[in-house]
Amino acid sequence: MSSSTPEHAQPSTASAASAAPAEAFVLPEPLDPAAPLPHRKTIRSWLIPISERTTVRAFVMLLLDYTLFAGLATGVVLFESVWLKVLCALLAGFVIGRLFVIGHDGCHQSLTPHRRLNRWLGRIGFLPSMTAYSLWDMGHNVVHHGFTNLKGVDFVWAPLTQAEYRALSPVGKLMQRIYRSGFGPGIYYMVEIWWKKMMFPTQKALGSTSRPIFTRDCLLVTGFAAVWIGALAAAAVATGQSAPLLVGLGFALPMFFWFNMMGFVIYGHHTHVKVQWHDERAAWQRAQPFVSTTVHLTFPMQVGALMHHIMEHTAHHVDMSIPLYKLKEAQKLLEHLLPERIIIQRFSWKWYFSTARACKLYDFTRQCWTDFKGHATSAPRALPAAV
């Protein structure tokens, strides 16, 4: 994991500018779709009035979600019906996702105005998902946000070329087919990101960056998991239930749901026939990837709100300092001011599996997605012209 961050990935100055009155900022007219995209700093300046963070709201959200998590965990123990236990376990997995989003905001320093408090709230929010705070900070904030969709640096759903795929072992090819089948995003996240990069990663996975805090954070989440499993086992003995069954329903099933939820979310964020990847840094910088590499995936019935608005992902990549409770407003503003620039996709299972069929490998020469045989499945694109 590289620790160098390009200029366009530096944290915004929203915290410094938040003291300025909102009326001091005059928004421009919507940009002509054919006009050059403004510099990222300019686009961020449009969002300054939206970037204010509040400590009380952060505590209320964290307390609410932990209360939901504890209540659902209790339901797994106390309900006699196996189906009610399973329902509580699945809902607990969803709440783990909500807690993760709160931790994610803390890690981005966008949850409250206080840096040290953000770090601790982030660690607390990350505990049920077994996410090591410092490793997520390095892999997500620095690498993924700093080099979004730059092949060889950003590792999140990075597509292979046909040559890379052909060079894999039979097992490697099978895993790629599973990952990109539409049914495998949870397996992908669990294996390729969580296990390899977030749980006591090897020196090879870390590259030249290794810090004692990485091990401490891994021990912290491992300790939380041990207490969680131990509490379930003790509850099984106290209530005369099967300990393996209760641990399976109370720990393994929520984690299974969480891995699938997380894999699905990040797949939807960055996989689309209109999303481009680059393997050449200059062309990648000219493409201004903070807008072109993310998808705003919309859902009916306030599903996006239930996920703490993490699907309003373009606004998050434009400015990581915007708190989750302001992302919907920020995304709406960006889509108004940048018409036809942002990929907006209404979710449907038909679209999802169509995307899974199309987005298998990537041809960096033709700038298009391909199937496993190298046949183009999206329209080839020209590379951004050098200025």
Image (cartoon, rainbow, N blue to C red):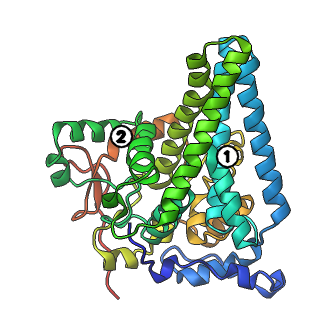
Q: Quadrant of the N terminus?
A: bottom left
Asked if residue 294 can be seen in this view, the reply is no
Find residue 98 and name its label: 1
| Position in image of residue 298 (x %, y %) | 61, 48
Is 283 on the left-hand or right-hand side of 98? left
**Is 380 on the left-hand or right-hand side of 163?**
right
Badge 1 amino acid: Arg
In this view, the residue in front, 175 or 247, is 247
Kindly report the distance in space between the C-alpha atoms of the residues bearing marks 2 and 1.
Answer: 24 Å
- Residue at image coords 55%, 42%: 347
Q: Which mark is residue 34?
A: none
Asked which quadrant contains residue 316, the reply is bottom right
SS category of the residue bearing label 1: helix
Callout in the foreground (2, 1): 1
How busy is the neighbourhood of tag 1: few (under 14 within 10 Å), some, or many (20 plus)? many
User: Does label 2 or label 1 sit earlier along the sequence?
Assistant: 1
Q: Quadrant of residue 149?
A: bottom left
Q: Nearer the viewer, residue 318 or 16?
A: 16
Is residue 250 at least partly visible in the picture? yes
Q: How many marks?
A: 2
Q: Residue at x 50, y 70 (%)?
A: 290
Q: Is residue 187 above or below residue 285?
A: above
Crowding at mark 2 (Cα within 10 Å: few <14, some 14-19, many 20+)? many
The answer to whether marks 2 and 1 mark residues whose Cβ atoms lie closer than 8 Å is no
Q: Is residue 134 above or below residue 373?
A: below
Secondary structure at numbered mark 2:
helix
Q: Name the spot of residue 223 as percent of width and height, x first.
A: 59, 44
* Amino acid, disc 2: Tyr
Side of 155 where 32 appears, left or right: right
Residue occupied by mark 2: 179
The location of residue 345, given as percent across then percent down, is 54, 50
Query: Which residue is at 49% across, 60% downward?
Result: 214
